[in-house]
Image (tube, helix red, strand yellow):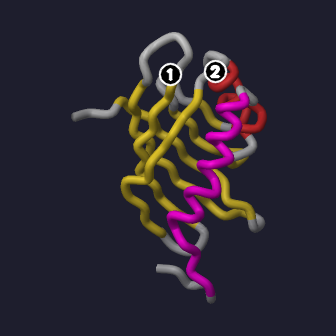
């Protein structure tokens, strides 16, 4: 339950964070993508997991130039003040191959007035 005076719009929070993530990916700017993540974020893309921003930088730096992502929020929940959960459908598009459909689980937290991803889990979309 939210205990603060103002309950944030959960989907608005997710869009705020994921739009910055999307922009960094489209610009092939791994550092910009990493800035969307908390300093101690647990990150699980489609390779072994990492903790912290360097793992995020390394992961997105290895992605091909021209990769873009579109996303849609499938479900969202607020878990206490400053914690938001999102279940996301993401389509990663490439210049030289078919798009990849993934599902993302993200936990976004508000630390020092800034919403950032604290947990990111990607998996192939099923059915």
Total tally of numbered discs in the picture: 2
Q: Which residues are magenta?
A: 6-27
> Taking 10 as reference, is 117 left or right?
right
The residue wearing badge 2 is: 66
Disc sitting over residue 107 in the figure:
none
* 15 within the magenta span: yes
The residue wearing badge 1 is: 47
Q: In which quarter of the view is residue 99 placed?
A: top left
Q: Quadrant of the C terminus?
A: top left
* Residue drawn 53% across the image and 19% down it: 94
What is the crowding at mark 1: few (fewer than 14 residues within 10 Å), some, or many (at least 20)? few
> Taking 31 as reference, is 51 left or right?
left
Q: Is residue 99 above or below residue 90?
A: above
User: What is the x, y in percent for residue 61?
Assistant: 69, 21
Q: Residue furthest bottom?
A: 5
* 21 within the magenta span: yes
- 56 and 19: which is toward the camera: 19
User: What is the x, y in percent for residue 3?
Assistant: 56, 84
């Amino acid at each position: 339950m939210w205990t603060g005076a103002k309950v944030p719009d959960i989907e608005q929070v997710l869009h705020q964070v994921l739009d910055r993530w999307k922009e960094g990916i489209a610009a092939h700017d791994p550092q910009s993508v990493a800035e969307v993540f908390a300093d101690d974020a647990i990150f699980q893309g489609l390779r072994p997991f990492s903790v912290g921003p360097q793992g995020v930088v390394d992961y997105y730096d290895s992605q091909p130039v021209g990769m873009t992502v579109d996303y849609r929020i499938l479900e969202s929940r607020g878990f206490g003040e400053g914690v938001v959960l999102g279940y996301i459908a993401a389509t990663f598009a490439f210049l030289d191959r078919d798009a990849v459909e993934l599902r993302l689980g993200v936990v976004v937290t508000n630390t020092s007035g800034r919403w950032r991803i604290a947990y990111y889990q990607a998996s192939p979309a099923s059915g």
